[in-house]
């Protein structure tokens, strides 16, 4: 697919260094992927798409930073500047830290098992999942409440 220069786009940096960093797409269907060397590539999304982006950084002592972001690309208006996402995106879900990110990834796996394409999940579900994770609810409570409210 070729893109026109006047069509707004959001680029996501995907990079990997063994035991140092892993910035990857968890879900999402980019319009274009551009390889930028052995350990890096760019995923380009058009406006209105939803994607999951995991950022992990470690060193010889283990995990130093780990976060999961579910973002919606925007073409104009206000957006949040996110490291690795250019120019930025609308944040629907954001977790930071090992425990909360693991719990969020488990919720994504459960949603994925229900034969749901995560790109098509309603935006309100992501926002409610974000609030439930912040409140410290258990995965079973979170998913039971969400599937009752938002059948996917």
Image (cartoon, grey):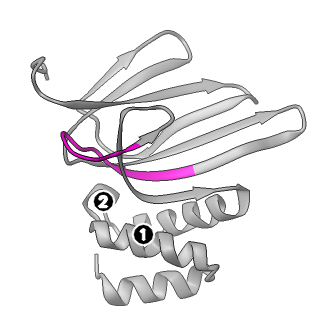
Residue 116 visible in the current orientation: yes
SS at mark 1 in the image: helix
Q: As rendered, which of 94 and 63 lies closer to the eye? A: 94
Above or below, 34 against 125 in this view is above
**30 inside magenta stretch:** no
Query: Which sits in the foreground, 105 or 72?
Result: 72
* Residue 55, x across and y down, in percent: 58, 41
Q: Image check: 99 left or right of 96?
A: right
In the image as oriented, which residue stretches furthest toward the top?
37
Location of residue 76 in the rendering, given as x and y in whole percent from the top left corner = 18, 41
Marks 2 and 1 in Cβ contact (< 8 Å) = no
Q: Is residue 71 magenta?
A: yes
Residue 59 — which label? none
**Residue position marked by numbered label 1 in the rendering:** 111
Q: Is residue 31 above or below residue 106?
A: above
| Quadrant of res 95 | bottom right
Q: Quadrant of residue 117?
A: bottom left
Residue indicated by mark 2: 117
- Magenta range is 68-80
């Amino acid at each position: 697919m070729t893109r026109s220069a006047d069509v707004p786009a959001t680029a996501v940096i995907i990079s990997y260094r063994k035991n140092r960093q892993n910035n990857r797409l968890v879900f999402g269907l980019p319009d274009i992927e551009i390889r930028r060397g052995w350990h890096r590539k760019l995923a380009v999304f058009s406006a209105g798409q939803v994607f999951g982006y995991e950022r992990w950084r470690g060193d010889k002592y283990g995990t130093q930073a780990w976060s999961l972001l579910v973002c919606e690309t925007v073409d104009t208006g206000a957006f949040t500047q996110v490291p690795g996402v250019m120019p930025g995106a609308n944040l629907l879900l954001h977790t930071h830290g090992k425990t909360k990110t693991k719990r969020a990834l488990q919720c994504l796996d459960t949603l994925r098992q229900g034969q749901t394409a995560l790109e098509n999940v309603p935006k309100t579900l992501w926002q409610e999942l974000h609030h439930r994770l912040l409140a410290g609810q258990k995965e079973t409570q979170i998913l039971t409440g969400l599937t009752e409210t938002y059948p996917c």
